[in-house]
Image (spheres, rainbow, N blue to C red):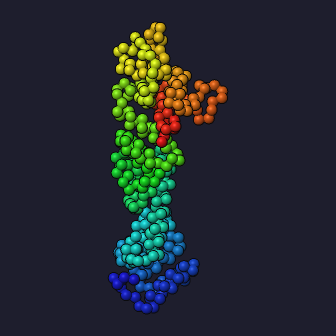
Amino acid sequence: MPASLAPLAEAERVAARQAVAAAERGDLALARRTAARLPQRHPVARFVELEIRFLEAAAIYPDCLQLAEEFPEWVAPWHLAAMAARRSGDLLAALGAARRAVAAEAGSHRLQGLVQELEAGVVERARSEAERWLGAGEAAKALGVAEQALEAVPESPELRTLAAEAALAAGRTDRAAALLPAVPDSANGLALKGRVAGALGQWDLAVSFFEKLPAAYPGRCDLLRRARLELRLADAPPYVSKALASSALTRAELAALLVWEVPEITALAQGAVPVFEDIVDLPQRGDIVTVARAGVLRGDPVARRFGARRGVTPREVAAAVERVAVLLRRQPPQFCNHGAAGDAAGCVRLGTPVTGREVAEVLQRLGGPGGEGCP
């Protein structure tokens, strides 16, 4: 007991120990009779009464905290406050009290173990609650849960990762970025850093993070394709950007995407130079000539028209992609049979009308070594 407490006679100290021991045995009547021998309102008498009430399953945390704050150097009330708060389910309060107990009795392995146990409980509860809110689409509430726990356990990498995930989902990109330096470079950490970089428009960084992911990481190729596509889009000429954003791709836009996403086509275009009268004023005219010379997209040599403004069909796109694969000597993606029976599992299904983004993603599958598109 701290020196600040009024001294007790030896018989009173014995009575205090006997009262607590009786309460721990479940003999609460004896505990109270023994505690009655203590000086009323003495801090030790108050503490013994709190011990008895705790063993009666009473809610004692507020009273225990008051006693502990009156005598902050006294370990026992802090420890009891921690136990009472934990039993009531308030892990944050329990952790705070346990840390005060450690401060009052430095070097206590028992108390340090309690602190570690409570820290783990705070982290686990925050993870469970935040994931539940995220699953319900309540990212802001998930962020609040994670950040409250992070204030109590600021060194937890799991909480930092959780808070950054929630911040990103809540549209708080700057907050997510601020949390990243302490997020470990685990597989999930790298994926998170890449997604935050992408949300900030830093697609070069996003690609760098995604490339470091293990080859077996779920969704790695999809993350890389998206990041590489966005990075290329940042440097694309306006007519390519327009093609990528197109919700109903034209033949001229398809030609632009073919050359942009698979630049090797240019070197493989060995055919005769066509003359198409309907492409003279188009910014894609050079790309149209290239794909026509390569035999990837053909026009009408008699009418001298390419049909540049006509929308493409899924079959037309699939045929063009397959011709590109032949030129590159790579395995083409397997396209779905447009609703017919016999579609293979995992086949590529193009929408109607075909969009620029889905064509770009298909072409990127041809972009890597061996046609993997995801080195």
Does residue 2 appear to the left or right of 135 in the view shown? left
Q: Residue at x 53, y 32 (%)?
A: 330
Residue closest to the eye, 280 or 330: 330
Report which quarter residue 231 is drawn in: top left
The residue sitting at 41% across, 42% down in the picture is: 207
| Percent coordinates x, y for residue 269 in the rendering | 44, 23
Q: Nearer the viewer, residue 215 or 182?
A: 215
Residue drawn where x is 54% and y is 79% of the image: 24
Could you say which is closer to the camera, residue 6 or residue 215?
215
Question: Which of the two residues, 349 or 266, is positioned nearer the viewer here?
Answer: 266
* Up/down of 205 relative to 234, above or below: below
> In the picture shown, does residue 43 fall above or below 222?
below
Q: Name above or below for residue 277 compared with residue 219.
A: above
Placement of the N terminus among the 4 image quadrants: bottom left
Can residue 58 be seen here? The reply is yes
Where's residue 13, x and y in %? Answer: 44, 87
| Identity of the residue furthest to the right in this view | 341
Q: Position of residue 52 (x, y in %)?
A: 50, 77
Residue 3, quarter of the rendered image: bottom left
**Lateral position of residue 213 relative to residue 181, left or right:** right
